[in-house]
Amino acid sequence: MEQLRLAVIAGDGIGQEVTLEARKAMRAALADVELVETEYALGAAHYLETGEVLDDATLASLAEHDAILLGAVGGDPADPRLAGGIIERGLLLRLRFAFDHHVNLRPTVLHPRIGSPLRDPGEIDFVVVREGTEGPYVGNGGALRQGTPHEIANETSVNTAFGVERVVRFAFELAEQRRRRLTLVHKKNVLVHAGALWQRIVDEVAVDHPEVEVDYLHVDAATIFLVDRPSRFDVIVTDNLFGDILTDLAGAVGGGIGLAASGNLNPSGAFPSMFEPVHGSAPDIAGKGIADPTAAILSAALLLEHSGHPDAGRRIRDAVDADIDGRDGTARSTSEVGDAIAGRISASTRKEQA
Ligand code: NAD
Ligand code: IPM
Ligand code: MN
C-alpha cells in the first residue's frame, strides 16, 4: 500500500490539542494510503525539559518525511528562559529556512455561515503568498553599544532577486488558476531598495502572464482594503514580515484566527513542506479544551492536497464546510468539533470507496 510518511510536531499549548484533531481528520480522509506518523517532541516545553531546541540529528530525521504537520510552538512570552525568540527562531524559522519553505501559502475564505467581524464583508476568497525565507526574518542584524543610551539595534531586511522572483512566479501561477488578479503589497514609498526590487520583478514576471491583472498597494493601505473591501483581493504577494501581519488580519476578517490554515511549501519537493495553523500556542486558552481545531484541520487538508492526495483533502474541506453550516453558536470543545468533522469525513470516505 502507498505510504504517507508524516512527521508531527504538536508543539506547545493549544498546538497539542488541535493537532490531535487534525490527525483524526487525516486518518479518516485517507483511503488506500497508509499514514505513518512519527511524533517529535519539540517546542518550548521540550526545550525547558531537555535543553534541545532542534538538534541536527532531529532535523535530518524530519527531512526523511513526506510532510510535516505542526501545531504551534512557543511558550509564555514573559518567560525569561525563552527570551530572544529561542524557540521561534531556533525551531520554527530554522525549519522554514533549512527546508527552504520559500512559499508561505495562507488562504482566507469566509464561509457564508461564519460571522465576520465586518459589517459588509462581501465575498472573501483570497490567498496571501507570503515569502518565507527572507526579509527581516533572516536574522541579519545586531546591536551596538548595548545597554547604553546610545544603543543601536539593526534588523536588516534581506531581499534577493532569486528569492523574490521564485515567490512572485509562484503567485502568478496561482493567480492563473484563480480569478487572475494579483496584488503586490509592499512599502515602496519608504523601503525604496527592496520595494523597487519587488516591483521590478513583478513587472517582469507579469509579461509572462498577460491575462493576470496586476496592481500594487502600500501595506498600510492594504490593511484598510482588507477591512473595507476584502472582495477586491484574489492573490496577494508580499514579503515575510508584511505577510505575517496581513495574515493575522486576514484570519480575523475571515471569521477568526481559529479557522486560518497555512502551508510552508518547498515547491521543488527537495524537502518536506510543513503545514500549520496561522495561530500560535495561545497560552491564554491552553489546556481548557476550547481551542478551535478548524485551522489545524484545514492545514491537514492543505497538506494532503500538496502531498498528492487531493481527494482526501477535498473530503476534509467538505466536512469542515458541512460542520460550519451546522454551527448554531452552541459551545463545543476542541475534541467535539474534531470528532464531528472526522465523523463526516469517515462517512464520505466510506461512501466514495463503496
Ligand atoms: P496566538 O495566535 O497564540 O494567540 C492570539 C489570540 O488568538 C489569543 O487570544 C488566542 O487565545 C487566540 N487563538 C489563537 N488560536 C486560537 C484557536 N485555535 N481557537 C481559539 N482562539 C485562538 O498568538 P500570540 O499570543 O501572539 O502567541 C503565543 C505564542 O505562540 C508565542 O510564543 C508565539 O511566538 C507563538 N506563535 C507560534 C506560531 C507557530 O508556531 N506557528 C504562530 C504564532 C505565534
Ligand atoms: C507565524 C508566526 C511566526 C512568524 C513566528 C512564531 C515566528 O507568527 O507563523 O505567523 O512570524 O512567521
Ligand atoms: Mn504570525
Image (cartoon, rainbow, N blue to C red):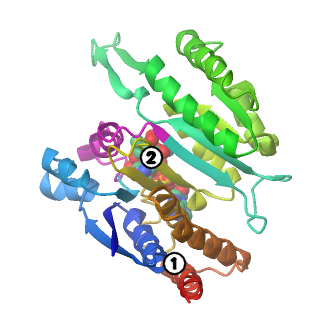
Q: Residues under labels 1 and 2: Cα distance?
A: 23 Å
Q: Which quadrant is home to the C terminus?
A: bottom right
Residue closest to the eye, 354 or 8: 354
Mark 2 Cα-neighbour bin, 10 Å: few <14, some 14–19, many ≥20: many
**Residue 338 shows which numbered tag?**
1
Question: Quadrant holding ligand 2?
Answer: top left
Residue marked by disc 2: 264
Q: Which residues are magenta?
A: 74-103
Asked if residue 125 shows in the view, the reply is yes
Relative to 86, is 170 on the left or the right? Answer: right
Residue 14: x percent and y percent?
42, 65
Relative to 217, is 299 on the left or the right? Answer: left
Relative to 113, is 23 on the left or the right? Answer: left
Mark 1 Cα-neighbour bin, 10 Å: few <14, some 14–19, many ≥20: many
Asked if residue 219 shows in the view, the reply is no
Relative to 251, is 68 on the left or the right? Answer: left
Residue closest to the eye, 343 or 48: 343
Q: Quadrant of residue 153?
A: top left
Task: Name the kind of residue labelled 2 in the image.
Answer: Asn
